[in-house]
Image (cartoon, rainbow, N blue to C red):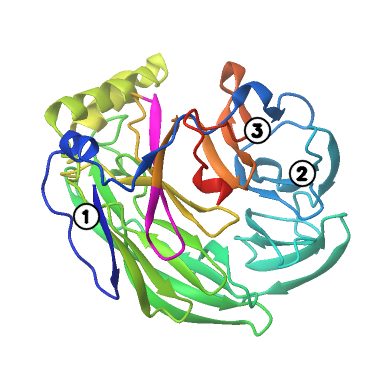
Amino acid sequence: MNERVVRGSVLCATLAVVAACEKQAAPTERLYGDLIDERSAVIFGEGVPELHSVGSVLLMSSGEIVIENRGTHSILVFDTAGNHRRSIGRAGAGPEEFLGLWGVWPDARGDSLFAWDVLSTKLATWTVAGTYINSQRIQSKVSLKPQGRFRDGSILAARTPQHQRMAPGDIRELDATLYRVFPGADSMVPLLDLRWENTAAGENPRGRAGPTYVTQPFGPRARIVVTDTSFYYTSGETWSIYGYSWLGTPLDSIVFDRPVMPLTTEIRSQYIDWSVDGSPKEVKQGVLRFQNSLSFPRTLPTYEELLLDTSGNLWAGEFVAPFAPQVRAWHVFGPTGEKLGTTQIRADIIPATITRTHVLGRARGASDIEIVFYAPIANDPRGQTTAAQR
């Protein structure tokens, strides 16, 4: 594959054959073996408290693991042996409660937490020990979804597209507005409008008389990861990843020359079959009618996950179709955009934090329950150092 860093520019991916690109890898690229030593993993979530709709997963400077448990509007703190130490916050409208927990970040020292309530638009601050410090509100008339926290305490948040009135068979490409939110000053500054998702409309699964149903085939496409003073963004429409400062000015871009996968008739049929198989028997016919009435995007998404490891390397996880979840390829880029290598990880494993020695992430356990794992990085069989150990 041919990757290069382009300062302040946006280039489209050129057409080529994916398999050929994989075989003709650049001489400096190192293909890592299995990244995670699952045999030595510590598992969280198989006992009490249970995990529901896990969001952020953090490794704090104290060595404790913080799990954003959105389903219970609380933050769970564990040690690395898997023991539950304490819970922070609960459901409610009080100063130490959350109506819609949606984003948790550490401070620069790693001993305090900032938690965003998306419904009350407040940022609550706690110590990892569980002491409540304060809350700051943003008087916003728009619903914002936080993407990350900058070094100065401001939040990068997205005003995601509103589903517009659409007729069955319509498909639209929608943008979102990114804002830099300053909770202490109760202000927010618009930065950029960026491509966010493809929205498609179909017939009501319960019959033609009802309202049009709107969906996002294969999910939202845009992905963002925030650094101290900048952020990376990918539209999911190309293999390129673009850098922006916290002022919204373009920085280095990682341009990935490989083709985008077309959404073929066969893939569309597989997706529809998968959607119907997961539906209750009494609504299967309606779901089938709805899926067949959709106009799907012309291409599959490119990336499904972006994250930064503790050394500042960018990890980009490829999209994996939900009806064929096996392994996901992760491409690793250095802080200046150089390609460090590629690794394969099971598709149901989503790393959240990668240190020099361990991986902390989310997965699905027995009976399809949500779990969080903390596992050592496996040794490379060729004796090479993995990107996470740089």
Residue found 35% across the figure and 46% down from its top: 303
> Judging from the image, what secondary structure is the residue with disc 3 in?
strand
| Residue indicated by mark 3 | 375
Residue found 34% across the figure and 50% down from its top: 221
| Residue indicated by mark 2 | 76
Q: Nearer the viewer, mark 2 or mark 3?
A: 3
Mark 1 surroundings within 10 Å by alpha-carbon count, few (fewer than 14), some (14 through 19), many (20 or more): some
| Residue indicated by mark 1 | 172
- Examine the image and state in which quarter residue 168 appears: top left
State which region is magenta. 325-340
Q: What residue type is labelled 2?
A: Leu
Q: Distance between the residues labelled 2 and 3?
A: 19 Å
Residues tagged 3 and 1 counted as in contact (Cβ below 8 A): no
Q: Earlier in the sequence, mark 1 or mark 2?
A: 2
Residues tagged 1 and 2 counted as in contact (Cβ below 8 A): no
Residue 118 spot, x, y in % from top left: 60, 60
Q: Which amino acid does label 3 sit on?
A: Ala
Residue 114 visible within the image: yes
Mark 2 surroundings within 10 Å by alpha-carbon count, few (fewer than 14), some (14 through 19), many (20 or more): many
Q: Is residue 83 left or right of residue 161?
A: right
Residue 260 spot, x, y in % from top left: 19, 45
